[in-house]
Amino acid sequence: MAEEKHEHNAPDSESPGYEKSDTRPAVVVIITLLSIVILIAIGIVLNEYFLLTKERIVYESVLKPESAALRELRAREDEVLNSYKVLDKDKGIYQIPIDRAMQLVADEAYRARQKADRGK
């Protein structure tokens, strides 16, 4: 009888060639869920990559280039804001750089504040 059992477990040349046991449903569910999670993650990463690439292309083609008119306007603004000029000599109106004007106004306000504090 031991020989019969041994013969039964031995590979048979007439065996059907497929697995006779059932698959475990838990393994199938886990593999399916992992596959879905991986596909979703890949989709999110590809979407973010697409958005970043699109933003970079829009910036480089639309937002970055400066027109000649804009450069000229900025040059005129810099000249007006950072140069000395006599506007009306008779009335004593002069143009000074904006930084110097802000410094003079701040100094004047500081002196006025000190005079007011001494007067109290």
Image (cartoon, helix red, strand yellow):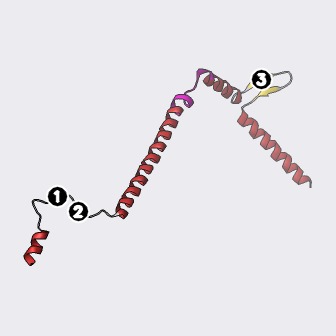
Q: Which residues are magenta?
A: 59-69
Camera-side residue of 41 and 21: 21
Query: Splitting the image into 4 quarters, where does residue 85 fall?
Result: top right
Q: Residue furthest bottom?
A: 1
The disc, 3 or 2, on the residue closer to the chain's N-terminal end is 2
Q: CA distance from mark 3 to mark 1?
A: 106 Å
- Spot occupied by residue 50 in the image (x, y as percentages of width and height): 47, 39
Give the structural element (helix, strand or loop) at label 3. strand
User: Around disc 2, counting alpha carbons within 10 Å, would you say few (fewer than 14), some (14 to 19), or many (20 or more)?
Assistant: few
**Label pair 2/1, CB-CB below 8 angstroms:** yes
- Spot occupied by residue 13 in the image (x, y as percentages of width and height): 9, 60
Q: Residue furthest left?
A: 3
Q: Which mark is residue 86?
A: 3
Q: Which mark is residue 20?
A: 2
Camera-side residue of 24 and 96: 24
Q: Is residue 17 above or below residue 55?
A: below
The amino acid type found where label 3 is placed reads Val
